[in-house]
Image (spheres, rainbow, N blue to C red):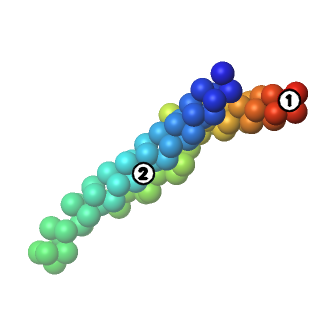
Amino acid sequence: MEKISFVTGIGLIALSGILFTIERFITVFQNASESFPVKLNGNGSYSSQPMPGIFDNFFVGLFLVLGIVLLVFAGIKILKTQGDK
């Protein structure tokens, strides 16, 4: 059971990192696509969107915290089973 929660913890942490990276990539892509025509023509304006923080997306924070909790519980169980042997 401890190996399942260890792998699940690593998976959830990786998923939160992937979600955060995709969210940042979309923001950079939107900023670039809005600013390119303005820079090409030399006139006009565009709104610069702020870069997302790590906890702006609810699921990133949830998966990160849940993954860390599962890693800690798995580590404690693994240490207990190695201590019993």
Q: Amino acid at mark 2?
A: Thr
Counting from the top left corner in percent of width and height, residue 37 is at 15, 67
Q: Residues within 10 Å of mark 2 (few under 14, many from 20)?
A: some
**Above-or-below relation of 85 to 64:** above
Q: Is residue 82 left or right of residue 23?
A: right
Q: What residue is drawn where x is 47% and y is 39%?
A: 15
The quadrant of the picture occupied by the N terminus is: top right
Counting from the top left corner in percent of width and height, residue 2 is at 68, 27
As drawn, the label of residue 85 is 1
As drawn, the label of residue 21 is 2
Q: Is residue 6 left or right of residue 18?
A: right
**Above-or-below relation of 76 to 28:** above
Q: Amino acid at mark 1?
A: Lys
Q: Is residue 45 left or right of residue 42?
A: right
Q: How many marks?
A: 2
**Above-or-below relation of 55 to 4:** below
Q: What residue is drawn where x is 81% and y is 28%?
A: 81
Residue with the most extreme bottom position: 42
Earlier sequence position, callout 2 versus callout 1: 2
Residue with the most extreme right position: 84
Q: Is residue 60 visible?
A: no
Q: Is residue 36 visible?
A: yes
Q: CA distance from mark 2 to mark 1?
A: 42 Å
Front residue (pair 16, 34): 16
Residue with the most extreme left position: 41
Name the secondary structure under disc 1.
loop
Q: What residue is drawn where x is 35% and y is 55%?
A: 25
Quarter of image, res 62 = top right
